[in-house]
Amino acid sequence: MERTDIRLTQDICGSLPEGTVLTCWSTNDLRFFIQINQKAPGQFGVYNVSVVAERYNIGPMGFEMCQFATDHEAAKEARRLAPLFARTNFRDSKWRRRYLEQHPEKLLGRKKKWRGWKGRLRTELSDAADRDMRRRNQS
């Protein structure tokens, strides 16, 4: 994990004060990217964690909050978050399939034609999006 400190400038600070320093930690593997952000800028102890597993066609997972101040608490939080964010989960094809069946919106699109259950899932998502679009147009 690599620590990054970002000092906000006027053009990117939004509602935060200019000069605020945001700290985050991330992996350097862009195809399996873990990111940990401070929940509140400048305050250590409360964090948001997320994963993008492009290697496995899984898009950004929602941020999960964790809180720790000591190494012992950090290890405890890591164990709590492991069922969702552990790399070993993503390497397990059965786990990935269950996760994508529960969260079909996280399946990243690819240029090749999907086969099997991924193809059926993509078709269902496309059909649902088409139905939603028709409903909006009729309103």
Image (cartoon, helix red, strand yellow):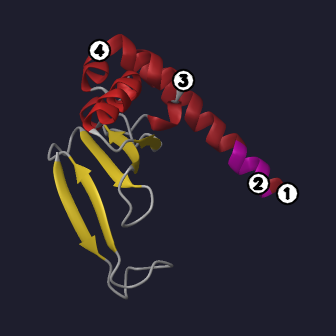
Decide: is 108 above or below 24: above
**For the residue marked with disc 3, what is the amino acid?**
Gln
* Residue drawn at point x = 20 percent, y = 61 percent: 4
Mark 2 / mark 3, whichever is N-terminal: 3
Q: Are marks 3 and 1 in contact (CB under 8 Å)?
A: no
Residue at 54% x, 23% y: name it. 102
Nearest to viewer (mark 2 / mark 4): 4
- Please report contact status of discs 2 and 4: CB closer than 8 Å, yes or no: no
Q: Residues within 10 Å of mark 4 (few under 14, many from 20)?
A: few
Give the residue number, with chain letter if any, for mark 1.
Answer: 139
Residue corresponding to mark 4 = 92
Give the number of the disc on residue 102: 3
Write down the region rendered in magenta: 132-137
Callout 1 environment at 10 Å: few (<14), some (14 to 19), or many (20+)? Answer: few
- Residue pointed to by mark 2: 136
Say which label, 4 or 1, has the lower sequence index. 4
Label 2 to label 4, Cα distance in Å? 39 Å
